Amino acid sequence: MHNIYIQKNGMSGLTNHPTIDDIKTSLDRGKFDEALIQIDQSNENKIELQILKATVLNIIGMYTRAFDEVQEALFESRKVNNKIFLMKAILSYTHYFLLQNPDQITVDQYIAEFKEIWNDLTESEKDREEGREIEGYYYYVLSLRNFYYNPGDYNEILTDIQKSIEIRRQLKHKFQIFISLNLLFSLYNNTGDFERISEVSKEIKDLAEKLDNKLGISHCNKILGEYYLLTGNYDKSKEYLKKSLEFYKKYDQSYAVSMCYHSLGELAYLEGEYHEAIKHMSKSLAIAEGTNRYHGIAVRLFLLILISIKLNSEKLVKNYLNKLHKINESSEIPLITVVTELAQALIYKNKSRSKDKAEAQKLLAKIIEQKLYGSIPFSYQLLAMLHLSELLLDELKTYGNEEVLKEVNELTRKVYEMAQERKLFYEIVQILMLQSKLAFLGLELDRAYKILQQTHLIAEERGLNHWLPIIESEEKKLEEEIGLALEISELAAPMRDRLEKSKIVNYIIDMQNMINTRN
């Protein structure tokens, strides 16, 4: 039936009006260029084609164009009397709206509208292939919504993602499973359940090989690269990221290339290879700047500023900070304002004069006080707390005034309450670990041990498996170090010695690096 082909990037594209089935088959195989050609040549329903086009554009990193397509699809779907098209358009619009401008009230309004239409369908309509496809998409959007606004509801998010995956496994076309699995990877990353990331990568690889989807296999390599980066196996991480990068470059997957360079830049930064880190992150930024995804651009600029500080390059710091200010002014997104203020604070923090460090303290305190919601904004507030704690502990080390230790304890208490309010259990565990070390520093051994027990309980209840061996190690270490606590208390040991022996600043710096990598 479809016997005429054209060539593009070494791939065949069908003419003679490809069907929706033809297009979805191309998506199953990761042939996105071919799918776009087919969409342009198809005479199927315009709304259906716009939604599919948005799916492809989103996958290849063209987010603004994807959002434009679904906006038009939603507008058109309201003019026709077809519940199926309207529900697909509402879900697609909500999905891409979340990525562009995560305003919770608007998102919830669209989800409520969808549910009202869905509940009017008969059971036979819901059980058809199209109905199941819509239901799988709904659970994906719902889990994405909670991932943004209620990240602490881990079990609820996990349940919804798993429902989405299970439904999508049963559909004729499987390309949407990759999208759900990618969100599952992000969830495990957020909760620190790194071992399960390898399970996700295996499912992606098995499915990609079955569908002959070479881009899916490459995506699996990227996930493994990030998994090894998060777990500290940098050689393995580099191997998988480079393998994935070369494949993405070959198939002109620009935003995936940007993400690989981003991860390679983080890796080089953690290894102290700052010139290499600048090179990779600059390439990542250059690609990201073409997407109008302001948060992604801001994150890259923030990391470039951190690297430039390590290189003691005032010229580079100034250049990247100016770019960040421009993005902040043009986007008017509160999160980017926080990123910009944090970057400025860290520039002040790394200067030698006390007046600059005082400015850093003011800015960091301001960031912590802001009312922000969601896991990503809070991660920057947590970073601000860690950097402010580091400054205060440096002051404590210099002057030995134990009132400063009380100030740090109060600071961690405040951020702990913020994390509790948002149900951010991964972050709660991090903060409690720091509080335990602060209690040890203040020679409150019983309190230090009780905090660790509380931390252990939370990690077990919330499935934060990555933390369990770390907490158990700290509990064992605390039991073994009672002698050290007695030693640092003898003859009122100077605070400088107590800080060095407790290694608390090292822990704070490790936490900073962990948050930067997870962001």
Image (tube, rainbow, N blue to C red):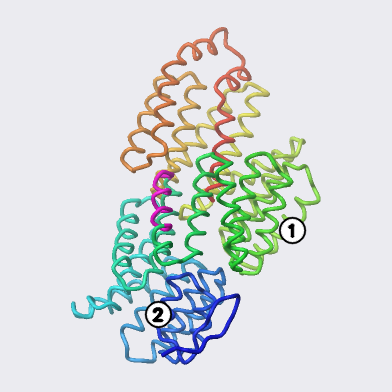
The secondary structure that dominates the magenta segment is helix
Magenta residue span: 192-205
Residue 418's spot in the image, x, y percent? 45, 46
Does 253 sit left or right of 95 as displayed?
A: right
In this rendering, the answer to whether 239 lies above or below 499 is: below
**Residue 18 sits inside the magenta stretch:** no
Residue at the spot 40% in from the left edge and 31% down from the top edge: 469
On screen, residue 181 versus residue 228, left or right, reads left
Q: Residues within 10 Å of mark 1 (few under 14, many from 20)?
A: some
Q: Is residue 499 left or right of residue 54?
A: right
The dot on residue 110 is none
| Identity, as a three-letter code, of the amino acid under mark 1 | Asn
Q: Disc number at residue 322?
A: 1
Labelled disc at residue 89 = 2
Q: From the image, state whether disc 2 or disc 1 is nearer to you.
A: 2
Magenta highlight on residue 195: yes
**Residue lying farthest right?**
315
